[in-house]
Amino acid sequence: FVEFDVDEDGCLSLSDLLSSSTHLSLDVAQVLLIAWHAHYAANIGGKDMMLAADWERALNQADGDSLLMSVGIRPGQASVMKESLDVVAAVLRFNKMSYEEGFAAFDVDGDGKLSLEDMLTSADILKLDLTREQLETVHGVLDAYSDGHVRREEWLRELASADGVEILKELGVDIDTEGQTPPPESSLPPQGDEGRLQAHQAPPP
């Protein structure tokens, strides 16, 4: 609710909903958002607004699993996706690589796209603590065109919401983020065979 409340007035206007949907790249037709908001909103001060209680009631009636499956994501994949991207973001931050540089590092064959093989090879080189199944999930979800490749724009968009800093903190790694741009400007550490964090060079182009 807070994320969608653009003007931070404690209410969700139609403008808030439409703006947030665009910002979050939600693939929902505007006419459906308008109808959804009208159905749950109440008239407050002459304006149709959704309060936090209206938002919660609306989401409690939603079938999130069906929605995820309609875009090719199985129930449970969303959490796997987030955890995996957080690990990738942490490794990039630890190695002081931007997300753009991270894409180039993962693009082993240098064709400007990430195949599953690119991702598996890079994960091995960077010692990412991710299983093949996790990597397949990430690659499958990011493969927007279902052609076996992840484009730069999908990579950057999804990593923009990843939280590598928290993983680094959990591992006891101090990263001074003062004066730095958020995740995209620096980013994570892999664990070595004995569980110690180690920096690794990106794979050759």
Image (cartoon, rainbow, N blue to C red):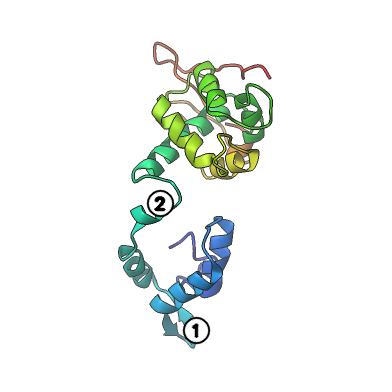
Which element is circle 2 on? helix
Answer above or below: position of 90 versus 21. Answer: above
Q: Residue 68, labelled with which disc?
A: 2
Question: Which residue is at 54% across, 23% downward?
Answer: 117
- Marks 1,2: beta carbons within 8 A: no
Query: Viewed as shown, does residue 107 lie left or right of 8?
Result: right
Question: Which residue is at 65% across, 22% downward?
Answer: 109
**Residue 119 falls in which quadrant of the image?**
top right
**Residue 24 falls in which quadrant of the image?**
bottom right
- Percent of width and height locating residue 37: 45, 74
**Residue 176 falls in which quadrant of the image?**
top right
Q: Residue 47, labelled with which disc?
A: 1
- Percent of width and height locating residue 56: 34, 66
Q: Residues within 10 Å of mark 1 (few under 14, many from 20)?
A: few
Question: Which residue is at 68% across, 24% downward?
Answer: 110
Amino acid type indicated by mark 1: Lys
Amino acid type indicated by mark 2: Leu
Q: Quadrant of the C terminus?
A: top right
Answer above or below: position of 12 versus 187. Answer: below
**Mark closer to the observer (1, 2):** 2
Q: Quadrant of the N terminus?
A: bottom left
